[in-house]
Image (spheres, rainbow, N blue to C red):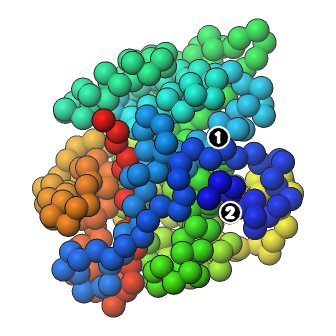
Amino acid sequence: MTGALLHARFPEVAETLPFVRLGTAPTPVRRCDLGTTAELWCKDESGYGDGGWGGNKVRKLEWLLPEARRRGARTILTVGGTGTNWGLATALYGRAQGIDTALALVDQPVDDHVRAQLRRLRNSGATLYFTHSKVRTILAAPWLYLRRIRGGTRPYFLPAGGSSPVGALGYVEAACEIAAQVGAGELPEPGHIVTAVGSGGTAAGLALGLRLAGLRTRVVGVVVNDALALDAKHIVRLATRTEHLLRARGARFTPTGLRPEDVTMTTDWLGPGYGHTTLAAREAEQRAGQTGLHLETVYTAKALAALLAMDDAGDFGAGPVLFLNTYGPRP
């Protein structure tokens, strides 16, 4: 698949919301046997991305990088933790598109992944600013923005995780892909889809995209970041802004009427904070690994731990429930 399903659904936005394919779609769906009561499926995004990094961040960049070019920006300025997957993906894919990246980095617990990621970041060509804390990052943002103006051309500023209305289109697109796979009989229509939530763009895009695609699937977001407001109101607010963006760029459709009651968000699996592992996450990572599903304990293993506990509580009934694996490391 080379073109965007969203453009096929709304051809009127093909010019106003440009898209560049950065991975091979569709990503696979398969049954998972983890001993759950609910029928469990996985949509594995880990292989998505044909460049130096993969996973859900690449989906967002397929819309964000063309938007940066449309604006005439030569630099993306964004923020993340010191082990940021988002920042690395932006630097690598941006460089391939002729766009520089500047990153403000906030401290997170240091482990082998963070140390390796910092080495990758230093080798990526990105300009790194170690701002250490959320408060210092906010205070430094105006200076960083002015510093990245080149020849009168402003940088394209993006929030953590690329979770802007344009970035959320990545998972509107993925929801259209899920709907196509359901229509093709590759999986049954899920009652729920469970995803880790670090900045909100994936959950918001899914919530909107599933509605636009005519699926009744409910999004369950497992919050893994304590530095951002990521409750149901925030997710639906971002989904609504993305819906407004589609309309502003020319799409015509009946309003979805999304409400906070239409998504489920839980912070029960966060642990001490962003980047901190938990026993439940480590156990879920090991359990998944026995079936060939490779996770990590910052995002995806916490989401699976929540799914397993919610299944034990009977929250999903007989299912089906779809787990979204968003982690896409590269050697």
In the rendered image, residue 85, in percent from the top left (x then y), is placed at 40, 38
The residue depicted at 23 percent of the width and 77 percent of the height is 33
Q: Give residue 5's mark.
A: 2
Q: Is residue 1 left or right of residue 19?
A: left
**Residue wearing tag 1:** 64
Q: Give residue 152's mark.
A: none
Task: Tell me which amino acid carries mark 1.
Answer: Leu
Q: Earlier in the sequence, mark 2 or mark 1?
A: 2
Does any portion of residue 35 appear in the rendered image?
A: yes
The residue depicted at 84 percent of the width and 48 percent of the height is 15
In the rendered image, residue 109, in percent from the top left (x then y), is placed at 23, 33
The residue depicted at 65 percent of the width and 74 percent of the height is 213
Question: What secondary structure is marked by label 1?
Answer: helix
Front in this rendered view, residue 121 or 230: 121
Disc 1 residue crowd, few under 14, some 14–19, many 20+, Cα 10 Å: many
| Callout count | 2
